[in-house]
Amino acid sequence: MRRLLVLAVTLVAVLGILAPPVMAQAPAPKVTITGFIDQIGTYTRNMSHYDFDYSRANDVQSYGRTRGRFDVIGEVGKAKAVLGIELDMYYGQTGSADNNIQGNATSAGFGASGGFDLNTDSRTIFELKWLYTEFPLPIPLPTTVRLGAQPFSTLATDKLAVYANGDFPGVAMIFDITPAAKLNLTYVQVEESLTGGRDNFVRGEDWAVIASFGFSPFKGLDIKPMYSFFEAKGPTSGSARQGRGGVDTATSFPTTRPRTVTPSASMRGSRPDRSRCSRRSCISSVIVRPWSSKRLTALWARSKRPTSARGWSTSAPASTSVRCRSA
């Protein structure tokens, strides 16, 4: 009997060694809804939110307001997707409609999307605050990546509004070098020009990069140097560029629109504008602009590569189109 028991235990041990390892169970998805609803009463005097005239001291207002902030967070392991929603409404209608879309956008009041009137049914008051994904990057150094519309949080500062606060669209990468040292790399897309002014996309290619490195050499001392570069072409977000020293941002940085040129036979000097075609047969156009004292108003028609100035004809029409066809 003793031998049989030893044999059985040995057999179980051998089978346990030979059995394939059980795959780790995938983490279960989880959805969390968090948020708050604030009820606010406010009294102000000479705040000049609307007239910007601080010498006029009789602009007095008092109102009640409701603010709701809700975050829907879906998680699978360390990866998560976040949807943030915000609603701001006054007690009572303030504009020509109960929201700032149907009525006058400025009449809804400062800091709200509209006002609850009788019956309180209001449309178009949802504000999409956050919409981003966050996940760990599979590299040896612990790294977290966030993509989409997200909060600045501590990416650009340790204290609120020292450099950048609020929200932005872009990419953030957070490298946890040690428990006491963290590197933050942030790309902010302020405006997008798409294909540019020739296609009537009048916004500039406005963007910024922010790099910060926070570390604590010893308890009680936190150091966080930061570098940032911001490029803005023409008008940009009012949150990034505000008028100072009498500078009017609306007139000092006008919207750049495409310039239409109507060439004539008497126009002196021009140059060809090379069309953008892939490696296909192309019939390209010439856009005539002032360039030099030479007379050059012509049609360029050649496959793939432009011709020299000797190949231009002075009797071609002034306006042509670009057509591409497969070779």
Image: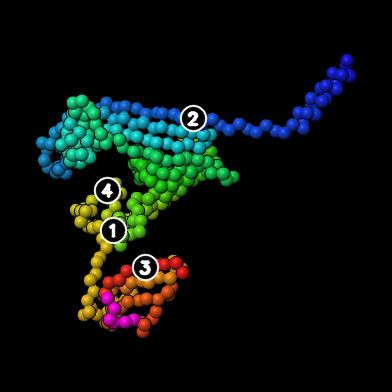
261 relative to 99, above or below = below
Give the left or right position of residue 56, taking residue 290 as reference: left
Q: CA distance from mark 1 to mark 2?
A: 44 Å
Element under disc 4: loop
* Nearer-N-terminus badge (1/2): 2
Q: Residues within 10 Å of mark 4 (few under 14, many from 20)?
A: few
Q: Is residue 8 visible?
A: yes
Element under disc 3: strand
Which one is in front in this view, the residue at disc 2 or the one at disc 4?
A: 2
* Nearer-N-terminus badge (2/3): 2
Instruction: Say the numbered circle drawn on residue 30.
Output: 2
- Disc 1 marks which residue? 200
Q: Where residue 294 sits: x, y (%)? A: 28, 82
- Disc 3 marks which residue? 323
- Disc 4 marks which residue? 238
Task: Write down the quadrant of residue 156 in the picture.
Answer: top left
Q: Is residue 11 magenta?
A: no
Q: CA distance from mark 3 to mark 1?
A: 20 Å
